[in-house]
Amino acid sequence: MKKNDTVQVEIQDISANGEGIGRADGFLLFIKDTVIGDVVEAKIVKLKKRYGYGRLMKILQYSPNRVEPRCAFHRQCGGCQIQAMNYASQLEFKRNKVENDLKRIGGLEGIVVSPAVGMDEPWHYRNKAQYPIGRDRAGRVVAGFYAGRTHTIIPNTGCCLGVPQNREIMETILEYANHHAIPPYDETTGQGLLRHVLLRYGHKTGELMVCLVLSGRGIPHQEELVGRLRVIEGMASITISVNETRGNVIMGEEILPLWGRGHITDCIGDLRFQISPLSFYQVNFKQTEKIYEKVLELAGLTGEEQVWDLYCGIGTISLFLARKAKKVWGVEAVPQAVEDARKNAAQNGIENVEFLCGKAEDVCSGLTEAGAGADVIVVDPPRKGCDQRLLGTIVQAGARRIVYVSCDSGTLARDLKVLAGAGYAVGEVAPFDNFGGTVHVETVCLLSKTTSDACITEF
Ligand code: SAH
């Protein structure tokens, strides 16, 4: 087989990037815009030693799992890779993905992975959107989403994963920007003002947040823009995030108030939380309560335990844990999130919780030394998983149970391998569909200590 050859391939799996995977002539081929069960004709565009990339030319046999994608941009946009698969197949794919990663990356055989828990309606579930701002060919200011693996903006203010209110807010901002010729930021030259717009919505409270990411500290005709945005039903917070850096980090670290509060609030179960622009908040309002319920169940608290909640964000999981534990320590790297967490504890009247600001890998060893050991540890790291130093500290802390909440099954598997090697048995593995239409999967996993202290002393 060589470049430009045309081959026939049956798609058997989906890669971490969302391409379909099949085999031809002993090669593993990655083919974008295909779904499991398709038989396709593809042209080889790149060939390595054992694998290659093909371009989809023709679908010879449609997968029974194919559906008409709801979004007209889904092939161009980098957001949803598997919208063309029906929802039941998406859930099945995600369960298998977790199982395969645990085997392939974690070397963990015979682990039972539960069916992925899905949403009743897998649309409009995201409570956060970040729109990049740019220009179209005609020079008009536009907002939308990056085309897969590029920084080309596909104009679209009405993504069907986001909440319907986003469209009205974005159209208002674009009208204003075009009327007053506000220059969008240009990444290649570093010129221009308006970089991104961050929107958030509290589903239980109906509160809306707009945060304008600018390369400066203000925007012309500010009062007019605020006047138009504040009348949108639910508007609670309008701020500026100042980002003067080059590079692709979206948010700047300084937040300036424009109107309303500096944060919005939302409820999970019977607890209320404040959420600032720089703080992490679970993006899927339909799934969060289900995930937190599972975390609590697996933590198995009786009221006597000392608990660490690592990567705790605004303290959401920490507060639920605190109501069932003796004491909880939450650790989080982003200072604004820690501020939110402390206020959230106070406002919900929860006193047996303490929040520490810093990287978990730096802070936790000090906790043990200070006598603040852990019976149960919850970790909920970003996609890159736990720092390896932190895993060492966790093992040393000797917690009875660890509940690992993961948004990337690859790094989950890598970390479970380390913990399993250090005497923890992997128990329940429960995937949740937090990110419908995409290849991403959220997983809650229980690890229980198998080697008892008595056993260690005997050796
Ligand atoms: N458990 C929370 C947040 C999970 S998201 C919730 O359910 O909402 C992961 C969090 O880890 C983010 O708030 C991020 O700011 C934080 N974080 C990232 N790297 C970190 C590190 N090295 N140490 C501590 N926190 C970190």
Image (spheres, grey):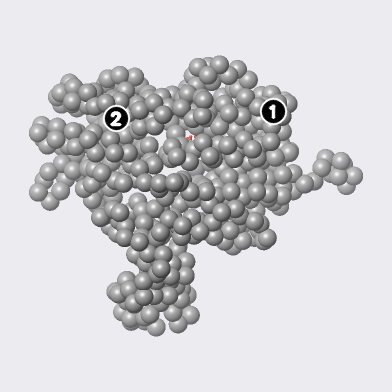
Q: Is mark 2 within 8 Å of ligand 1?
A: no
Amino acid under disc 1: Gln
The residue tagged 2 is 210
Left or right: where does residue 294 sit relative to residue 150? right
The residue tagged 1 is 306
Task: Tell me where residue 143 sits by quadrant.
Answer: top left
CB-based contact (under 8 Å), mark 1 and mark 2:
no
Amino acid under disc 2: Val
Q: Nearer the viewer, residue 2 or 210?
A: 210
Which residue is at a point 41% across and 65% down the rendered structure image? 65
Mark 1 closeness class: few <14, some 14–19, many ≥20 residues within 10 Å: many
Q: Nearer the viewer, residue 108 or 122?
A: 122
Residue 283 at what x, y percent from top left?
42, 39
User: Residue 180: which disc?
Assistant: none
Query: Does the rendering let one see residue 348?
Result: yes
Residue 446 at what x, y percent from top left?
65, 45
- As helix, strand or loop, the secondary structure at mark 1 comes to strand
Up/down of 399 relative to 423, above or below: above
Query: Does the rendering let one see residue 390?
Result: no
Residue 183 at what x, y percent from top left?
15, 37
Up/down of 51 relative to 190, above or below: below
Which residue is at a point 57% across and 61% down the rendered structure image? 100
In space, the residues marked 1 and 2 are separated at their CA atoms by 38 Å
Q: Residue furthest right?
A: 458
Residue 380 at what x, y percent from top left?
55, 40
Which residue is at a point 34% across and 19% down the rendered structure image? 261
Quadrant containing the N terminus is: bottom left
- As helix, strand or loop, the secondary structure at mark 2 comes to strand
Left or right: where does residue 247 sit relative to residue 88? left
Q: Nearer the viewer, residue 401 or 437?
A: 437
Up/down of 55 relative to 137, above or below: below
Q: Nearer the viewer, residue 391 or 208?
A: 208
